[in-house]
């Protein structure tokens, strides 16, 4: 415990934690020691975990990297967090992230950017940037992030750690601040696939507070073994062929393909015809949902409220929301409001829903042929702070390989896959069919 | 002072109104539609508010199935088609009493489609009664907003979120209503139905039943609809009718003066009987409806539907039918007793303890109903219990007490649910004298006192019997059972 607290202190320049629960964590640790001595400890006894600052933990601040929730204290505990606590995990603090989980670099935070421990001049990825660096720099054993379009996997790849996005609906969203409800997933960031599997086992499963959560029984994901037959693995052709993908990453991905073939697995390229539609579909639907999800932050009941030159209700809304939200959140609210507006609804929202269905169908067809689909997690390694901050489109492209899993709701994991010449981590993404997290973790384990 | 322009009846008769009603009914579910908070009227402000109601970050809605069942009940009662696959949509707009910044409602695919409600109406001109069916366009489920209180504080608007998340059904009629009277009868019938179905208390004053009116005018015979105006803030059936009449005249005024009506929302002021423009109609407002991704679609399976159907409370029509056939009541009695569920249930409860169904009806329509205020009736605060009334009827039927004495007993046992009518009759000396020997003596005394009359009677002047009965009753100080006296006199005079 003390070792983590010391390391957190030593790494303040990385700007990982927005609040550290030092005293509380010490007390929790003592209590767990007691339980261990009595043989009553839970599955996660002593596991020191950090929470992305979008997960509700009763009595603790909750900010989502935003000024909008200035002074806000959570009044209830997220189901996922409660299940960790019930198994005697120790919550050490909450972690910096992109505002309302919107971003790919963790530069959109009211608390300032998080820095990559591999190179503090580079971004850690986002939006769960603080959560990834916390594991990377050994500030806690594991983090719980959220993944709407790659927000667990992309920073995991940038930081050389493991990030698991489970099947949509596998973990309750109760207590997770909504970005885009039909995409959002809670997911662990860890050093190993097995740690991720263990955390998933604890957090997953039915929950009366979330009607979109699956009622499927939770398996022992960390115990699942791969079939003894050769695996059928598809790889995204663009991941190794496209000029848009960094040379070092293409090479690393190719090496994995070669190794798998050498091990006797069937590995084939997959052309995903709708690849170019993934990002537009993702951005139209997530911003549409976000524009509505974030309406509750209106300065009326809690959070930030503008006080100066507020003359009437409309100006209260306008000023509170303009001052409370950062530019990226405002951009996405505007985009989503536009996509849902009467004159453009069919051209954008309805069309995107139709394309989402087509993407699902094509993805299903791919998985009729393959057990897994692999690709680089990201097209580039961690970029420099500020490098893409003024170019939202370039920034959005950082999610090109990760959004598919969210659009279709499939599980995917990012595992470390070496480094580039500069020593920057490279990630490999593996995607599996719905609820095949056990096999996914087993396959990931075989690769690391 | 505003001088009312009067429209000549000639002008008035050139036009007809086209009215559609939107009725919101707050459902009497125990908890809110998407949260476990209690759903009840009149609690202290902001005491029934959980993190879900307040839309704290990270909260999710959870559907209350009872609200779905209640909506389906109404649909079944109206003969609507029940939608099996229901999706909730978000209606996005900002208002301080709307915590999430969107209202969960149904946009496409309301839970009930079509159907209608039969009403009996009088023609306003001829006074002729007629029956017509008000067509239901659809019924959808949604959540209520909180309440903004503007007069509680001099400088601030206060907000009470207790009501936020109360389940509502919104019933929308076709634009098929032709008179204010039809609108009034329709509302009366809706209120009766929701009360019979136990899904809403139907109280317009407290706002648990709310009605908005959509009205346009056109020349009789025209096929195009005129410009629609919505009138809100109507807190009684009478005010709905007044607002329709007033708006009908206002619109004709505008048209006759060569003006153009604008599509708008107006608010009705019951004090002046006039409506005032509120805001430009929502054509300006884009609610950006889209399916709520936090709620999975609600599928109403065959089993569930059958279960709801099996547990439907009896409807007014069926109750009326039963009263005329099973209990053999005249139409008038059946209509009056089935008018409210409370009275109908009371009647049936009485009839479990007596088979004198007509007497039960008479007692309820007369003495019982006469004492009840509307509120007492709704709260089922009856002066006597059904079993007390049944016992009283039995006492009359077996001759223990007279009708007159029974009226007295009824008064004496009011609000004393444990009092037994037989005991009251005893205690107050109201039991009829049925002692044959004692009465025989009285009969003989009377006959002895009227020898002439006895003679005339025996010669055929049978109507003198009444005189003898009266005299015997007098001697008994009213305690004798007149039937028995009658019988004894006939026997004695014949002997």
Image (cartoon, coloured by chain):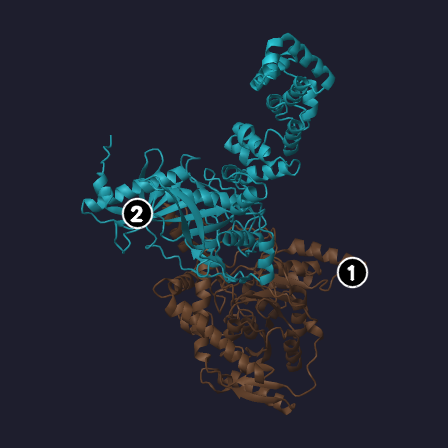
On the image, numbered disc 1 is attached to which residue?
A36
Position of residue A355 relative to residue A24, above or below, is: below
On the rendered image, what quadrant is the C terminus of chain A found in?
A: bottom right
Q: Residue at x 66, y 30 (%)?
A: B394
Question: How far apart are labels 2 and 1 at the CA level?
Answer: 80 Å
Would residue A209 be visible to someone looking at this image? no
Q: Residue at x 59, y 18 (%)?
A: B465
Residue A91 location, x and y as percent? 65, 59
Query: On the picture, is A112 further left or further right than A58?
Result: left
Question: What kind of element bears circle 2?
Answer: strand
Residue B312 location, x and y as percent? 58, 51
Q: Residue furthest front?
A: B459
Would residue A338 be visible to someone looking at this image? yes
Residue B164 location, x and y as percent? 50, 47
Q: Which mark is residue A18?
A: none
Query: On the picture, is B472 further left or further right than B283?
Result: right
Q: Chain of mark 1?
A: A
Residues marked 2 and 1 touching at CB (< 8 Å): no
Q: Which chain is brown?
A: A
Query: On the picture, is B289 further left or further right than A77?
Result: left
Q: Which mark is residue B17?
A: 2
Q: Chain of mark 2?
A: B
Give the image quarter of residue A215.
bottom right
Position of residue B145 relative to residue A292, above or below, is: above
Residue B409 location, x and y as percent? 63, 23
- Other-residue count near label 1 (Cα within 10 Å), few / some / many at <14 / 14–19 / ≥20: some
Query: On the picture, is A27 further left or further right than A286?
Result: right
Visual hue assigned to chain B: cyan
Question: What kind of element bears circle 1?
Answer: helix
- Other-residue count near label 2 (Cα within 10 Å), few / some / many at <14 / 14–19 / ≥20: many
On the rendered image, what quadrant is the N terminus of chain A found in?
A: bottom right
């Amino acid at each position: 415990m003390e070792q983590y607290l010391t390391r957190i202190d030593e790494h303040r320049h990385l700007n990982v934690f927005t609040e550290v629960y030092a005293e509380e964590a010490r007390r929790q640790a003592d209590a767990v020691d007691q339980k261990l001595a009595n043989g009553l400890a839970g599955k996660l006894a002593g596991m020191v975990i950090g929470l992305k600052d979008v997960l509700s933990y009763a009595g603790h601040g909750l900010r989502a990297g935003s000024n909008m929730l200035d002074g806000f204290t959570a009044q209830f505990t997220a189901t996922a967090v409660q299940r960790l606590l019930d198994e005697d995990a120790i919550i050490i603090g909450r972690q910096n992230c992109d505002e309302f989980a919107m971003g790919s670099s963790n530069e959109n935070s009211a608390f300032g950017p998080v820095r990559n421990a591999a190179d503090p001049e580079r971004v850690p990825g986002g939006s769960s940037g603080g959560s990834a660096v916390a594991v990377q720099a050994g500030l806690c054993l594991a983090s719980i992030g959220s993944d709407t379009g790659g927000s667990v996997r992309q920073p995991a790849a940038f930081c050389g750690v493991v990030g698991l996005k489970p099947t949509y609906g596998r973990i309750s969203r109760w207590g997770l601040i909504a970005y885009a409800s039909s995409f959002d997933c809670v997911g662990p960031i860890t050093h190993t696939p097995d740690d991720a599997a263990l955390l998933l086992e604890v957090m997953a499963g039915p929950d009366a507070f979330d009607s979109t959560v699956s009622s499927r029984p939770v398996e022992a994901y960390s115990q699942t073994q791969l079939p003894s037959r050769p695996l059928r693995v598809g790889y995204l052709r663009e991941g190794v062929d496209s000029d848009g993908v960094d040379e070092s990453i293409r090479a690393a991905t190719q090496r994995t393909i070669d190794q798998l073939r050498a091990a006797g697995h069937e590995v084939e390229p997959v052309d995903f015809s709708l690849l170019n539609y993934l990002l537009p579909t993702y951005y139209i639907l997530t911003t549409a949902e976000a524009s509505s999800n974030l309406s509750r932050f209106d300065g009326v009941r809690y959070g930030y409220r503008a006080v100066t030159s507020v003359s009437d209700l409309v100006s209260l809304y306008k000023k509170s929301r303009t001052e409370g939200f950062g530019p990226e959140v405002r951009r996405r609210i505007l985009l989503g409001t536009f996509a849902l507006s009467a004159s453009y609804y069919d051209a954008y929202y309805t069309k995107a829903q139709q394309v989402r269905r087509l993407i699902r169908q094509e993805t299903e067809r791919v998985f009729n042929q393959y057990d897994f689909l692999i690709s680089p997690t990201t097209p580039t390694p961690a970029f420099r702070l500020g490098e893409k901050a003024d170019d939202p489109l370039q920034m959005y492209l950082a999610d090109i390989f990760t959004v598919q899993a969210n659009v279709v709701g499939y599980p995917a994991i990012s595992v470390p896959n070496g480094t580039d010449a500069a020593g920057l981590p490279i990630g490999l993404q593996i995607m599996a069919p719905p609820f095949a997290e056990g096999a996914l973790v087993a396959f990931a384990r075989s690769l690391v | 002072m505003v001088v009312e322009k009067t429209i000549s009846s000639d002008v008035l008769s050139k036009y007809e109104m086209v009215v559609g009603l939107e009725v919101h009914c707050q459902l009497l579910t125990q908890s809110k539609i998407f949260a476990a908070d209690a759903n009840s009227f009149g609690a202290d402000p902001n005491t029934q508010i959980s993190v879900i109601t307040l839309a704290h970050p990270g909260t999710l809605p959870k559907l209350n199935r009872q609200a779905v069942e209640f909506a389906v009940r109404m649909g079944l009662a109206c003969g609507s088609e029940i939608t099996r696959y229901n999706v909730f949509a978000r209606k996005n707009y900002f208002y301080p009493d709307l915590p999430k910044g969107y209202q969960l409602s149904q946009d496409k695919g309301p839970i009930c489609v079509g159907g209608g409600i039969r009403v009996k109406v009088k023609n306003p001109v001829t006074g002729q009664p007629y029956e017509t069916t008000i067509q239901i366009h659809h019924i959808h489920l949604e959540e209520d907003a909180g309440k903004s209180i503007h007069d509680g504080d001099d400088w601030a608007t206060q907000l009470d979120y207790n009501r936020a998340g109360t389940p509502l059904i919104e019933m929308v009629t076709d634009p098929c209503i032709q008179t204010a009277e039809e609108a009034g009868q329709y509302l009366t019938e809706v209120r009766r139905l929701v009360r019979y179905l136990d899904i809403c208390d139907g109280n317009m004053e407290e706002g648990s039943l709310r009605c908005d009116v959509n009205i346009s005018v056109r020349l009789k015979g025209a096929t195009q609809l005129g410009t629609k105006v919505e009138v809100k803030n109507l807190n009684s059936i009478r005010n709905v009718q007044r607002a329709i009449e007033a708006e009908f005249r206002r619109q004709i005024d505008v048209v006759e003066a060569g003006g153009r009506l604008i599509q708008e929302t107006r608010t009705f002021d019951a004090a002046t009987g006039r409506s005032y423009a509120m805001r430009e109609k929502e054509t300006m407002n884009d609610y950006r409806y889209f399916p709520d991704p936090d709620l999975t679609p609600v599928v109403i399976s065959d089993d569930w539907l059958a279960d709801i159907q099996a547990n439907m409370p009896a409807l007014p029509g069926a109750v009326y039918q039963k009263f005329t056939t099973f209990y053999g009541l005249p139409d008038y009695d059946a209509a009056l007793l089935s008018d409210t569920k409370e009275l109908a249930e009371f009647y049936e409860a009485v009839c479990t303890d007596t088979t004198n169904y007509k007497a039960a009806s008479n007692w309820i329509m007369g003495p019982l109903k006469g004492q009840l205020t509307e509120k007492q009736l709704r709260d089922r605060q009856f002066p006597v219990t059904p079993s007390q009334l049944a016992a009283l009827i039995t006492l009359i039927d077996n001759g223990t007490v007279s009708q007159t004495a029974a009226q007295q007993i009824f008064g004496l046992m009011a609000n004393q649910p444990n009092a037994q009518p037989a005991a009251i009759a005893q205690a107050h000396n109201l039991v009829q004298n049925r002692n044959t020997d004692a009465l025989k003596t009285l009969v003989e005394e009377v006959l002895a006192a009227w020898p002439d009359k006895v003679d005339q009677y025996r010669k055929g002047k049978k109507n003198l019997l009444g005189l003898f009965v009266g005299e015997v009753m007098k001697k008994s100080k009213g305690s004798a059972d007149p039937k028995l006296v009658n019988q004894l006199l006939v026997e004695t005079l014949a002997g």
